[in-house]
């Protein structure tokens, strides 16, 4: 048999753990197992009807051809208006790119900005794909660890200590996947004061969960807290989480025109334009009101309150309440320490899918061993059943 010699870049990375867990749960369900899947970060709500109708209209109107690589002008205009009205940030069309999902925006950014020897600072726990995408760009991930006691939020002193002459980019995600934690405007301003002292460091603010928020204060990202960082900040977002449009695959980024132009060049040689029909749907979503979104957020908040309270009633689990996204990030190290044949969060997750028919993601996938992430982007009856299974498994 021919030996396949793969490129070294492939050996640097691992498959997405969250997608792997979802695939495993789907395979077990197909085999007849009653699996409760709490791994996927995918809202269980259907895409709102007005958005679907916009896509259907686009099909009948013949909008099924290639578009501009970086997105149709009307969608970019809708994004620019949203960024001005919601975020207070002004961007021209040449400062905006639309891509095949938020993940491609981040990938394009890293490919455009990072080269061998560059360091990228990533607070931990982190979204699983950040480090691997940095490695694919020949960069070096640099992690800032956080704890449950500090609500998984880094301090200015930690950020200062992590910056070196090789630091090229700082990535921040608030509300956070996997913790759901949210930085306040003051906390972001304090971090920005550190970054202002280091003009060689770029900033990527991943705002994909910006509308899934239940703090008393309105959403704020690092650039909104400190407009002085405008010339070296890229704002990343998309429609997947907010509008229950994960399968439509539309994300967007805004930032300095030279960086966006480089991202467009990379996109032109990979996927080219995002799907034309999905762009029409995304424009309808962004131009529409947020009433449906508010209803979804109210449901997420109720599920959050129920799940966090239930987890904290199980001996050996500690779970801080959060303020956004749709994840509970629970400490289970005490349970691991008490189980004779379990020595890690990965082993615990494997045990739960086999013994309790519950699929969740080990914290080590997010750079935080001894934890698990549970998605509550599912119905309340499923969460009730999941808690009963967890209580029985750990009793």
Image (cartoon, rainbow, N blue to C red):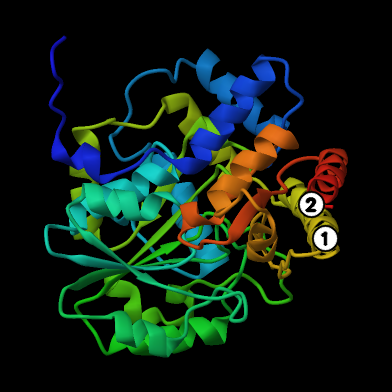
- For residue 382, side relative to residue 374 (left or right): right
Above or below, 84 against 48 in this view is below
Q: Residues within 10 Å of mark 2 (few under 14, many from 20)?
A: some
Asked if the residue at tag 2 contacts the one at tag 1, i.e. Cβ–Cβ closer than 8 Å, the answer is yes
Instruction: State the image coordinates of residue 247 (x, y, percent, origin top left).
Output: 54, 30
Q: Which residue is identified by label 1?
A: 314
Picture mark count: 2
| Residue that appears at 65% across and 45% down | 288
Element marked by disc 2: helix
Q: In the rendered image of this protein, does residue 93 appear above or below residue 182?
A: above
Question: Residue lying farthest front?
Answer: 340
Q: Quadrant of residue 206?
A: bottom left
Please indicate whether residue 48 sits to the left or right of residue 389 in the image.
left
* Chain-order first, disc 1 or disc 2: 1
Q: Which residue is mark 2?
A: 394
Q: Residue at x 64, y 44 (%)?
A: 360
**Residue at mark 1 to residue at mark 2: CA–CA distance:** 8 Å
Q: Name the one closer to the observer, 333 or 194.
A: 333
């Amino acid at each position: 048999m021919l030996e396949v010699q793969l490129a070294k870049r492939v050996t640097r990375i691992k498959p997405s753990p969250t997608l792997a867990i979802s695939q495993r749960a789907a395979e077990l369900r197909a085999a007849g197992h009653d699996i409760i899947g709490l791994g996927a970060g995918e809202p269980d709500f259907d895409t709102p009807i007005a958005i679907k109708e916009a896509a259907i209209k686009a099909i009948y109107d013949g909008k099924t051809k290639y578009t501009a690589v970086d997105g149709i002008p009307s969608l970019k205009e809708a994004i620019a208006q949203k960024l001005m009205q919601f975020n207070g940030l002004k961007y021209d069309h040449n400062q905006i790119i639309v891509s095949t999902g938020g993940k491609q925006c981040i990938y394009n950014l890293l490919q455009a900005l990072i080269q061998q020897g560059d360091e990228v600072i990533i607070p931990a726990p982190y979204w699983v794909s950040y480090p691997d995408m940095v490695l694919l760009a020949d960069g070096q991930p640099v992690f800032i660890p956080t704890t449950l006691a500090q609500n998984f939020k880094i301090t200015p002193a930690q950020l200062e200590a992590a910056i070196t002459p090789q630091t090229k980019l700082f990535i921040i995600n608030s509300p956070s996947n996997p913790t759901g934690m949210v930085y306040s405007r003051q906390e972001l301003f304090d971090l920005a004061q550190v970054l202002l002292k280091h003009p060689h460091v770029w900033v990527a603010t991943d705002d994909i969960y910006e509308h899934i928020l239940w703090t008393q204060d309105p959403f704020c990202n690092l650039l909104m807290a400190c407009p002085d960082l405008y010339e070296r900040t890229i704002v990343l977002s998309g429609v997947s989480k907010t509008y229950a449009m994960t399968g439509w695959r539309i994300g967007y980024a805004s930032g300095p025109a030279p960086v966006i132009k480089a991202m467009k060049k990379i996109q032109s040689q990979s996927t080219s334009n995002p799907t034309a029909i999905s762009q029409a749907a995304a424009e309808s979503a962004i131009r529409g009101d947020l009433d449906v979104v508010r209803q979804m957020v109210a449901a997420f908040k109720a599920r959050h309150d129920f799940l966090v309270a239930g987890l904290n009633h199980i001996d050996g689990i500690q779970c801080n309440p959060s303020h956004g996204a749709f994840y509970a990030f629970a400490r289970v190290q005490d349970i691991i320490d008490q189980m004779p044949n379990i020595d890690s969060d990965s082993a615990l997750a494997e045990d739960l899918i086999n013994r309790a028919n519950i699929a969740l993601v080990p914290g080590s996938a997010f750079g935080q061993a001894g934890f698990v992430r549970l998605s509550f982007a599912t119905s309340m009856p499923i969460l009730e059943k999941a808690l009963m299974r967890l209580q029985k498994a750990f009793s």
